[in-house]
Amino acid sequence: MGECERVAEEIYQVGGSDLSDPNDAAAFVVKCGADLVMIDCGAGRAPEALVENIEEAGLSPQDITTLILTHCHVDHIGAASYFRERYGCSLVAHALDADAIESGDPTLTAAGWYNTTLPKTTIDRRLREADESIVLGADQLHCLHTPGHTPGSISVYVDRSGSRILFGQDIHGPFSREFGSDVSQWRLSMQKLLELEADILCEGHFGIYRPRDRVERYIRGYLDQHQE
Ligand SMILES: [Zn+2]
Ligand SMILES: [Zn+2]
């Protein structure tokens, strides 16, 4: 598989369909002082490939203290129990998606659709606010509640070296009654993301977008496709 990709200063993409396993959505690590924060972790079929990519970036997987789960779909979070058990990191997810993750609900997590199962795991921190931060030393990772694709979808952003980096997984959808999707909530969520004026967008399946006007065009393109 491919090599990890540097996104910005001490931020790397370490998982994805070309980087770790064809089933994996994108996964990222953000170095925050001595801590490593991971954002999503792939489908769980090849977590060792992500570990290798983290090491290849010159980072130690032992330093992963926090794993943020952007939503409950198995292609994004299938390796959550692997990382929690192996590295002792705490799992963070929005309260509205946490039950599905903890129980491994085959429909809500799309595990049935992917012909797999989601190993049960405990969520250590349930987010409940519209904007909740994870603060590690000088770094602040904002977790915005951006419902739409699923009820508990979150988008994460961090400001680093003058750039705003947004991790917006599955902000394109898809929308399905089975997932509890809500297009009118999603439109409000996308407005929130546009207001951030992010310089770099790390998407879940379609790569990394920059600069700012391309990020904006990407989000507006989907808003145009899904009018009310
Ligand atoms: Zn999804
Ligand atoms: Zn996805």
Image (cartoon, rainbow, N blue to C red):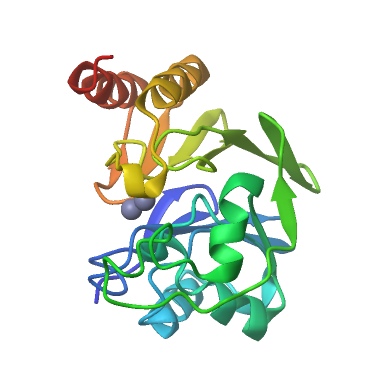
Vertical relation: 45 (above or below) 36: below
Side of 64 where 120 appears, left or right:
left
Point out the residue furthest to the right here: 137
User: Is 191 in front, or is 9?
Assistant: 191
Q: Which of 180 and 215 is in front in this view?
A: 180
Q: Which of 10 and 92 is in front in this view?
A: 92
Task: Please state the horizontal and vertical placement of residue 224, each as a whole percent of the image.
Answer: 21, 16
- 184 on left or right of 97: left
Relative side of 6 to 161, left or right: left
When asked about the image quadrant of residue 49, the answer is: bottom left
Q: Is residue 33 visible?
A: no
Q: Which residue lies furthest to the left in this view?
A: 225
Q: In this view, does 219 lie above or below 32?
A: above
Rendered residue at 26%/65% (across/down): 113
Relative to 114, is 134 above or below? Answer: above
Locate the N terminus by quadrant.
Answer: bottom left
Q: Can residue 169 be seen in this view?
A: yes
